[in-house]
Image (cartoon, rainbow, N blue to C red):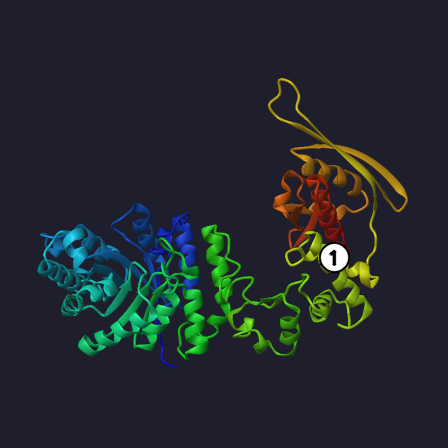
Amino acid sequence: MPRVAIYDTTLRDGSQGEGISFSIEDKIKIARRLDEAGIDYIEGGWPASNPKDIAFFERAREMKFAHARIAAFGSTRRARVRAEEDNNLRRLAESGAPVVTIFGKTWEFHVTEALRVSLEQNLEMIADSVRYLKEHIGEVIYDAEHFFDGYKANPRYALQTLKAALEGGADIMALCDTNGGALPHEVAEIIRAVRQEIGGPLGIHAHNDSEVAVANSLAAVREGCLHVQGTVNGLGERCGNANLCSIIPNLALKMGFECLREGAVQEITSLAAYVNEVANIVPNDRQPFVGQSAFAHKAGVHVDAILKHHSTYEHIAPEWVGNSRRMLVSELSGGSTVMQKAREYHIELDKNSPETRAILEEIMRLENQGYAFEGAEGSFELLLRKHTGSYRKLFDVKGFRVIVEKRPGEEEMVTEATLKLSVDGRETHTVAEGDGPVHALDSAMRKALEEFYPCLSHIRLTDFKVRVVNVKDGTAAKVRVMTESTDGSASWSTVGVSTNIIEASWEALLGSVEYGILCAGKK
C-alpha cells in the first residue's frame, strides 16, 4: 500500500486549544504513546516561545524513539535581520530535533498588514530561513500559512512563496488552511493547480472551523499529498485541528493507505482515550470511530439487524479501531435488544417470550415517567433479574427520615439521616450526619449494612447528576438522578425519578448499593 506520513501536532497546536495545558511530563507521556503507535512525526513545541518547550526538547534528546521523529516548530526570520542572527532560527537549530518545521506567510494581506514588509521581502525571508535551517538540520518542513486564502486572493504570489521554500531546500511543503474556511472541493482544485505548477512534495494542515478539516485532509491525499498534519481527538485552537483519530482509520480502512505500524489502527480508540486522560478532558462520546457512542444502537429495528450482520447499520466493525458495540436499552428497544443485553448478563431470553414482552412494557412505562436506562445499565440489570426470577432481595427498607437544619450562628447546614431496615429478619436502626441529604443517607445505609455485606467498604460514589424531566412544571417538576459507583475494578450507573429530589436520589443510591453487592456476590 502507498504510505501517508502522519505528522502529529497535539503537543504544539493541540495545546493551543482552550482549557488545555500540558506539563513537561504530560508531553513526554504522549510522545511515547504516539511513537508506540507508529506516528511518523511528533511536533514537540516551539523552542523559542517558552521554557517548558525548551525543557521538552532537552528531555527528548535523551529519549530513544522506535519510529517517530521529533519536530521543532518556529517561524521564518524577522524582517531586516540575517537568518544566522535570528534568535528563533538559532533556537530551532540548537533544539536537537532531527526535523524542524517553520511557517511563513502566503497571503499577501498578511504580508503587508501583519508583517508590514514588502511582498519581495517576504519571499527572501522564506528562502533565507529554510536555507539556514537546511545547513544545520537534516529535514525541514515548510508550513505555508493561510495558503488556501492566499491562493484565492493571489494565486501567482501564493505559488511564489512555495517556490521560495523549494529554492531554500524545503523537504516538504504543507499547505495550511489556517482559518479553517476552505471547503473540500476548493482544497482539491487548488492542490491540483499547485501540483501542475510546481509539483511536490506536498502536505496538508487543516483546521476545523467549518467542520470539514478531516474531509479537506482526505481530499488533499486524493490529490497527491502524502503528508498529513493533525492532532489526536482534533484538539487545537478555536474549533480544533484535523482529527487524526478520524483521518487515520479512513485512510487505512477505506482508502488503502498505510499510516501507522502494523496493527496500530486497532489501537486508535485507546490512543484517543489516553490523550484525553492525560489532558484531563471529558471524552466526546459521539466522536466518530473512537467515541463511546460511535457504535451504540438504540432503535429496536437497528439492533435486530445488527445482530444478523454488523454492516446493516455500521460502516465498519468497531473492533477494527479497537472500539466496541453497545446495545442501548430504552422505550425504542425491541425484543432483540433485550435478548442481547440479557445474554451479556448470562441470562437466556427469547425475543418473543412473555418475559421479554413484560420487560419491554416495563421499560416503556418507566421511561414515560422520566427514567432513562441507556445510561443506567445497573438499574436495567436489576429490572431484568426481577422479571426473570434471578433476583434475590438483599434487605428490606422500613423507612427513612432526613432533617436539614440551619442553626443560629453557624455557617454550615447540619444534615441528619435516620434509616430503618432489616436483613434476613434482623432489624437495624441507624443515624448518620453528612454534608447533604444524599451523603447522610449513604452513611446511614453503610452503617446498617456493612456488618452483613463487608464488600460495601470498597464501593464508592463517583458521580451524581440531577436533571429536570418536565421543566414546564417548575419546582413541582420531576427530577431524574443518575449515580455512578465503583468498587475499584468495575463501574455501574443507576437511575431514580421522582417529584421529590430526595426520593429520586435515594432510589438511585439504593439501586447502586444493591447492584454493587450483587456484583460482589457474583465475583
Can see residue 388?
Answer: yes
Residue at the spot 73% in from the left edge and 59% down from the top edge = 363
The residue depicted at 64 percent of the width and 43 percent of the height is 473
Categorize mark 1 by other alpha carbons within 10 Å: few (<14), some (14-19), many (20+): few
Nearest to the observer: residue 522 or residue 115: 115
Q: Is residue 202 left or right of residue 490?
A: left
Residue 309 vertical position relative to residue 42 in the rendered view, above or below: below
Residue 39 vs residue 491, the one in the foreground: 491
> Residue at coordinates 44% horizontally, 77% vertically from top-left?
254
Q: Left or right of 510: which side holds 424?
A: right
Q: Is residue 466 visible?
A: no
Report the front residue among 419 and 96: 419
Q: Nearer the viewer, residue 522 or 339?
A: 339
Position of residue 250 relative to residue 374, above or below, is below
Residue 406, given in percent of the width and then of the height, sits at 66, 24
Quadrant of the snapshot with the C terminus? bottom right
- Outermost residue, front side: 472
Extreme-right residue of the structure: 425
The residue at the point 40 percent across, 59 percent down is 31
Circle 1 is placed at which residue position?
Answer: 365
Q: Is residue 280 above or below residue 305?
A: above
Of helix, strand and loop, which one carries label 1?
Answer: helix
What amino acid is found at the position of numbered circle 1 in the picture?
A: Arg
Among all residues in the image, which is located at the extreme bottom?
Answer: 1
Q: Quadrant of residue 213?
A: bottom left
The spot of residue 336 in percent (x, y) is 70, 71
> Measured from the top left, where is residue 472 in percent x and y?
62, 44
Residue 440, position in %: x, y?
A: 70, 35
**Residue 43 lies in quadrant:** bottom left
Which quadrant: the N terminus?
A: bottom left
Question: In the visual, does 107 lie left or right of 497?
Answer: left
Q: Tell me the quarter of the picture where residue 432 sits.
A: top right
